[in-house]
Image: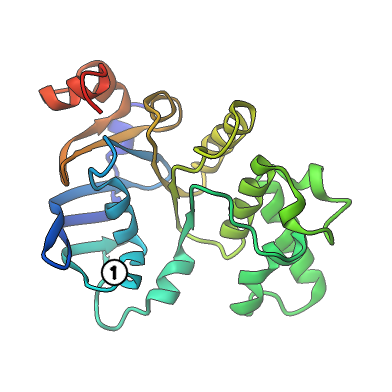
């Protein structure tokens, strides 16, 4: 996908985002546009602010005592931090997949049905069956689990558990999916499956992924943002960031001089 093709209207528009944990400032004046129906990767060394910024998008930082966020963060033109926005409702629109697969200690079926049930998305059992199957198909898991939907989700392999979590995330029909190092606990084969899945899913979602793996960022994303010491150093089309970065800090990180 060319750079021109990913500069359409921003799904997420951040302006001058600052994040403080008590007195300590973790993010400094981050401004970034994130396109829809594309994968945007956040890269940078540990502790550089990638996950902190990711957690601003679904207001997960609200759950941390003494965390303060300033600036403007709009999703489809609406301010995510406005007083009338319910963070719980926001988080159904902005799903999140964490580093370690975290299926609920319930059946595979109930894992996927959990969100739709809470939000009253299915009137009948037949409606719910449709949602569960569609979500598991979207997560590339249906064929592997269709004959054991009543078995526990925690009995699946690590890679299958992560795809179950992705199915659970898409079941409530989010607009945006955040992924925080989604493959760091997985083996190479499971990682390849998740990457393939991310590539398929970007046709329907805005996906934002935090990854330590530059190879992964290069494989799955169309846009990359490089963070360093709490600042957004550089952002652009992934191919350009990796082959022709404008900032020497980006160059040094990508070539392995630090990180």
The residue drawn where x is 52% and y is 35% is: 199
From this viewpoint, which residue is outermost toward the front? Answer: 23
For the residue pair 204 and 240, the one nearer the viewer reads as: 240
Report the quarter where the N terminus lies. Answer: top left
The residue drawn where x is 48% and y is 68% is: 92
Q: In the image, residue 144 lies at what x, y percent? A: 80, 42
Residue 16 visible in the current orientation:
no
Give the residue at mark 1. Answer: 80
Asked if residue 22 is positioned above or below residue 30 in the image, the reply reads below
For the residue pair 9 and 147, the one nearer the viewer reads as: 147
Asked if residue 105 is positioned above or below residue 165 in the image, the reply reads below
Asked if residue 158 is positioned above or below residue 111 in the image, the reply reads above
For the residue pair 105 and 117, the one nearer the viewer reads as: 105
The residue drawn where x is 45% and y is 65% is: 93
Secondary-structure class at tag 1: loop
Q: Quadrant of residue 165?
A: bottom right
Q: Quadrant of residue 14?
A: bottom left
Q: In the image, residue 168 lies at what x, y percent? A: 62, 59
170 sits left or right of 32 in the view = right
Residue 73 visible in the current orientation:
yes
From this viewpoint, which residue is outermost toward the bottom? Answer: 84
Report the quarter where the C terminus lies. Answer: top left
The residue drawn where x is 79% and y is 65% is: 129
Q: In the image, residue 31 lies at what x, y percent? A: 16, 50
Please tell me how crowded label 1 is: few (under 14), some (14-19), or many (20+) other residues with Cα within 10 Å: many
């Amino acid at each position: 996908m060319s750079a021109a093709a990913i500069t359409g209207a921003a799904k997420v528009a951040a302006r001058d985002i600052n994040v403080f944990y008590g007195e300590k400032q973790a993010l400094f004046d981050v401004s970034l546009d994130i396109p829809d129906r594309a994968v945007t990767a956040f890269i940078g060394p540990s502790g550089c602010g990638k996950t902190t910024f990711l957690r601003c998008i679904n207001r997960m930082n609200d759950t941390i005592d003494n965390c303060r966020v300033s600036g403007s963060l709009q999703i489809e033109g609406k301010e995510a931090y406005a007083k009338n926005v319910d963070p719980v409702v926001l988080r159904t629109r902005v799903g999140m997949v964490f580093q370690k697969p975290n299926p609920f200690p319930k059946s595979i079926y109930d894992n996927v049905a959990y969100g739709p049930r809470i939000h009253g998305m299915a009137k009948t059992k037949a409606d719910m069956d449709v949602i569960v199957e569609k979500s598991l198909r979207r997560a590339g898991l249906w064929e592997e689990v269709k004959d054991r939907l009543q078995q526990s989700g925690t009995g699946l392999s690590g890679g299958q558990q992560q795809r179950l979590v992705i199915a659970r995330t898409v079941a409530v029909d989010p607009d945006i999916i955040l992924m925080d190092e989604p493959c760091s606990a997985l083996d190479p084969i499971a990682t390849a499956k998740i990457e393939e899945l991310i590539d398929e899913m970007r046709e329907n979602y805005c996906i934002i992924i935090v990854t330590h793996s530059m190879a992964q960022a290069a494989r799955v994303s169309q846009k990359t943002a490089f963070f360093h010491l709490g600042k957004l150093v550089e952002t652009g089309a992934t191919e350009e960031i990796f082959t022709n970065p404008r900032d020497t800090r980006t160059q040094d990180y990508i070539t392995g001089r630090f990180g």
